[in-house]
Amino acid sequence: MKKRVKAALRHQYQSLSLEILLDDDFDAVIEEIALYHEERNKGTWLTQELIDTWKTLHRMGHAHTVSVYVDDVLVGGLYFTSVGRMVYGESMFSRATDTSKLALAALGAFCACVNLPLIDCQMPSEHTVRLGAQIFSGDYFLTINRALSQTVDFNWHRAKGISLIPFMEKR
């Protein structure tokens, strides 16, 4: 991942152009995630009704995405929600090696720079732990979650469409 992140800082992925954007195309990302899980698992929990609900939540400002483009093609990304200063990772997809990891690393760097101190990744995985995830006891998590979710919301509209690569440079 270190090599992949260093290349990302140069806006490159295997000598092709790379961009990582916040809230660029929510609809495309969530539809790709549903398709990705359908293909991998022969089914998905992301029914059309849920997808439509998530799209509504996005329009209301509660659900967000990170999109990874290689040569202007969407190849990876994730979606998440935010309440107060708390961020909740939901799901991701990758059509090219490590692109979902790049999305998560970019989101983590952005959150660190704008005082969003915690991303709940729900279930630890090998790659979230490699990217710095820590496992908290339920009581400790609930205490932190309560405090962060009751603070003033981050203004996501102000950050719509920005490149997250500069935030990775700072981290």
Image (cartoon, helix red, strand yellow):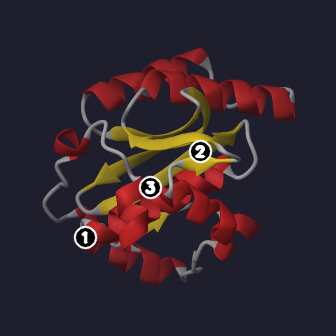
Q: Is residue 95 visible?
A: yes
- The numbered dot on residue 91 is 2
The residue beneath circle 3 is 88
Residues at marks 3 and 2, CA–CA distance in whole angstroms: 10 Å
Q: Quadrant of the N terminus?
A: bottom right
Image coordinates of residue 150 in percent, x first then y, are 20, 64
The reply, left or right, for residue 154 in relation to residue 38 is left
Residue beneath the point at 44% across and 57% down: 107
Could you tell which of marks 1 and 3 lies nearer the N-terminus?
A: 3
In-image side of 156 versus 68 (left or right):
left
The quadrant the C terminus occupies is bottom left
- In the rendered image of this protein, does residue 45 appear above or below residue 166? above
- Give the number of the mark in front: 2 or 1: 1
For badge 1, the amino acid type reads: Asn
| Image-based side of 153 in relation to 81, left or right | left
Q: Residue at x 41, y 67 (%)?
A: 169
> Tags 3 and 2 in contact by the CB under 8 Å rule?
no
Instruction: Provide the secondary structure element on which disc 1 rests.
Output: loop
Q: Residue at x 53, y 30 (%)?
A: 29
| Left or right: 145 in relation to 115 | right
Which residue is rendered at x = 62% and y = 21% of the image?
47
Q: CA distance from mark 2 to mark 1?
A: 22 Å
Image vertical order of residue 126 relative to residue 10, above or below: below
* Mark 3 closeness class: few <14, some 14–19, many ≥20 residues within 10 Å: some
Residue 115: give its label: 1
Residue type at tag 2: Ser
How far apart are the alpha carbons under marks 1 and 3? 15 Å
Q: Secondary structure at mark 3?
A: strand
- In what element is the residue under mark 2? strand
